[in-house]
Amino acid sequence: MKLQDKVSEIKGVGDKKSKLLHNMKIDTVDDLLHLLPRKYEDRRQVSYIMEAPFNKDVLVKGKVLARQMRGNPYNRRTPLRILVQDNSADLEILFFNGRYLANYFNIGAEYTFYGKITLNNGRRQMAHPEFHKLGDKDDVRGIFPVYPLTEGFTQANMRKLQKDALQAAKDAEEWLSPDIVKEYNLCGPEYALEKIHFPEDEREIREARYRMVFEELLILQTGLFYIKHGCRAAGDGIVIGADVSVKEFEERLSFKLTEGQERVWKEIQEDMAGNRAMNRLVQGDVGSGKTIVAELAMYKTVKSGFQAVMMAPTELLAKQHFSSLKRDFEPLGVTVDLLCSSLKSREKQEVLERLKTGETNILIGTHAIIQPNVEFKSLGLVITDEQHRFGVNQRTLLAEKGTNPNVLVMTATPIPRTLAVILYGDLDISIIDTMPPGRKPIRTFLRGEDSRHDIYEFVRTKVKEGRQAYVVAPLIEESESIECHSAEELYEELSSEYRDLRVGLVHGAMRQEEKDSVMEAFASGRIDVLVSTVVIEVGIDVSNATVMVIENCERFGLAQLHQLRGRVGRGEHQSYCILICGHESAVANKRNEIMCKSEDGFAIAEEDLKLRGPGEIFGTRQHGLPELNISDLVKHVDILEDVKKVALDIIEKDPELTREENRPLRQKVKKMFGENIQLNL
């Protein structure tokens, strides 16, 4: 049997099991061996029945004293009870549907049992344990792998398949250089595969896991460096000279750039003046002033004779950008246009014509911008706003509208630097870590259901003072399976509660035109209280909104809570965020405590990472980031640092991964990244 053989070559894997494995993305023997245990059960030590803890998995040994089936012995649902005893106590072993086991257990014979002991009417009992006759070659003692499974497999099935598949592990060739293996003290691939599945002790688990984490992170980091190098080596970028002045734009600003904005603007200018195209991510908390930095870059680009484009995730946000950019640029003779789906055909055509002739200097729009019929005369700068709403492919399509234009990516979603380096591995990273002076901190409070009346009265008071409020719910409509408030339920309740106020509703199931209409009504002050789901997480600026009420806050992650809170606090008036906790838990309490104490998005993101791990923070795989099988970007940050050095050295010496010694790595990179990486074979 070979590693690349179909999984059906394994004894016992027929069409049915092959289909089940295919659904788990397992088609070859190698795929199966890389279905790694999620944990291990230590069954090496036998416990005395009397001393074994309750409700924890334990291994016990006992002699069968009696067996009994109460009820019809021919009914397969009749329970089987086995009484066993060791030198310390008796234990009842219980099997529901136990008829098929009735003749297995011999009176006087000894067996081992693995499961949880409970106390039932004063009697120790273990239900449905794993068991073996003492001395059997398949005894249950040892360290046992526990796999992530799908319906149709048991742990015993999977362990047998893995043991059979390990026959092919002898074909696992060493693909890392001897220098890397020696420097980082890595075990061999055959040893790693064998011991990750069936170790004899903790040391073997550590050695196997270390090897597999190292190689997985090396494949990931090499792929990201390959992409980054490809962006830089794609040809000469558009050079925006350092001598091109933006003084007249800066003089029109009513404020001075913050220290963070100055630093990031300097980094952008250095990029734009270089021979290679800029590929830079600008991270900044809500309100940190990313847009002004982007406007400076646009103005410098236009002054150099090129066009700029900005893509926003929603039409409403695109319209807001269009309005503010038009206000800032028109007095300086810069032409700004808007392209979005709601424009009439004739208006779209006029915009496309102006863009093609170069009459339009700056284009703002939504996904409509990446359509094939959108042509620029001389595109020099591409900006995507709220990058986490776009995939890598969309960013690439937009950049392809020009010849190696400079690319600026903006996000207000704070991402821990460890993850940012991975998630945006093809980009250089800038962080605006200072806030404009004079902004009032948002006061955040945690309240329970018993404070609902007081919260409603507080909202009414603020609205009567001329302000507006958001009320955010985790669900659109009521659910029988999830106990929490829904947006529709709250809308009905608040419409009745606030008969003297104007209450609106917006959620993700509405058509885009409906959502935009409601949001525009809120922005213009025609709605006082907006009930919503998280669709407002990335929304327009409503400086008059000063109250954010978040229902069932325990159902949101920290980063999402912070984003929602950032919808208020954008004007001169004091703003408030009220978290209503429906169900307390240790994690929810920790989140709430952090939210009430901190407004620093990056500090909150770090805590979110610790609480939830990278998997949830990455969310959907729209970024094109490969799924990691064994690595944890938080726990394995030290290994990641080592791996980055190795990957960088490989790419610097062999940018296209064409050397003979790098061909296995090349194939692994291609497999990991799939469609999201183009390796020219």
Image (cartoon, rainbow, N blue to C red):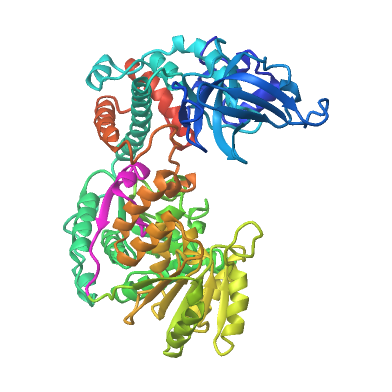
- Residue 517 place in picture, x, y as percent: 56, 74
Magenta stretch bounds: 410-437
Residue in view at x 25 percent, y 25 percent? 653
Q: Is residue 432 left or right of residue 626?
A: left
Q: State which quarter of the image contains the C terminus.
A: top left
Identify the residue shown where x is 51% and y is 15%: 3
**Residue 473 on the magenta segment:** no
Whole-percent x, y for residue 660 in the image: 34, 15
Q: Quadrant of residue 491?
A: bottom right
* Residue at screen point 37% across, 73% down: 324
Q: Is residue 155 above or below residue 471?
A: above
**x and y, in percent, of residue 402 in the image:** 39, 49
The correct choice, above or below, for 17 with respect to 253 in the image is: above
In the rendered picture of this protein, how many numbered marks are placed on residues?
0
Of the pair 266 and 306, the residue shown nearer to us: 266
Asked whether residue 306 appears in the rendered view, the answer is: no
Instruction: Please state if 237 lies on the left or on the right of 496 as rendered.
Output: left
Let me know if residue 413 is in the magenta part.
yes
* Residue 294 appears in the figure: yes
Quarter holding residue 29: top right
Check the picture and name the quadrant holding the N terminus. Answer: top right
- Measured as percent of width and height from the top left, residue 190 is found at 41, 14
Q: Report whether 605 appears left or right of 150.
A: left
Closest to the observer, 274 or 457: 457
